[in-house]
Image (cartoon, rainbow, N blue to C red):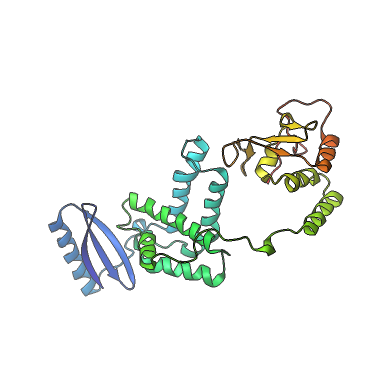
Amino acid sequence: MAAKVREKDGFYWVVVHHRGLRKWKKVGKDKRRALWVAEQIQARLVLGEFEMSGEDEQLVPFSALAEEWFRQEILLPYELGEPDALAAKSVQAREQHIRLHLRPFFQDRDVQGMRVADIQAFYEHCREKRRPGTMSTLNTILGTLRRILAFAQARELLGFNPVDAWKAGRGRQRGGGLRPVDSSKVLTADDLQALLEVARLEFPEHYPIMLFMADTGCRISEALALRWGDVDLTKGAARIAASIDFQGKRGPTKTGRSRVVELSTRLQAVLADRRPDVFGGDELAFPSRAGTPMEY
């Protein structure tokens, strides 16, 4: 157990190590005051009078901070349509990182006491549980964690970012870059035909959109946003110019650019049977029964 003074970014912090935990307390720019605070805390440590947690209001639970970071830094810019906001899929991914991986592990741990060892423990936990299934996804989740803790730094709750220190200690890892997709995760021609046949016989409402995605390679978000005004059955082509996200919000494609896809003969026939005789250019090609965009 110890209380030491550290200088970072022009400010002095008292770092307290006690019962396997570490806590940073910002003092200010006066080094003499920081040394005095450290002496007082050290004396309380020796006498057994110091408690790491202190009063409840001094704790900053990880779950609460992660939720606030997502609301302030991710969701709000997206809802306001700010230029540097993340795309819809990325917003959804960050929410899943927190809900499925980070919050279940860190729960209400005090952010102010998070250490490099906590990041290593999370990494080992994910690897042992094999969740997420790939290293690339795990690295992305660690990136989300790094941004959450950077948010804590900006609020002066942390003196350093444990994720940055953890990565620096590990050094450059081998095996980076693009990897081929596992063949077990790719449908064969027979698999795809079987899937489409089940959709045609048992889920006829969804068969057209399934066939559209299968034959054009479009994302589901792009298929949901397709309008009859963008479909040219005479030329056998469709213009992909928009997408609809998981919140039902219409926006640009993932790349921000439109493109034209070719329609197969069987797809043209299905779309011709489905298209109403009278329609407006903004009418959806694959709407729900209520005429609104389908839900994911």
Q: State the quadrant of the N terminus.
A: bottom left
Image spot of residue 205 (x, y percent) = 81, 44
Image spot of residue 18 (x, y percent) = 29, 71
Q: Nearer the viewer, residue 211 or 67?
A: 211
Q: Is residue 85 above or below residue 5?
A: above
Q: Residue at x 26, y 66 (%)?
A: 16
Q: Residue at x 50, y 70 (%)?
A: 125
- Left or right of 245? Residue 101 is left
Q: Nearer the viewer, residue 34 or 221?
A: 221
Image spot of residue 164 (x, y percent) = 37, 59
Q: Quadrant of residue 186?
A: bottom right
Q: Is residue 212 above or below residue 186?
A: above
Q: Is residue 159 above or below residue 223?
A: below
Q: Is residue 198 above or below residue 17?
A: above
Q: Residue at x 21, y 52 (%)?
A: 10
- Left or right of 285? Residue 89 is left
Image spot of residue 212 (x, y percent) = 75, 43
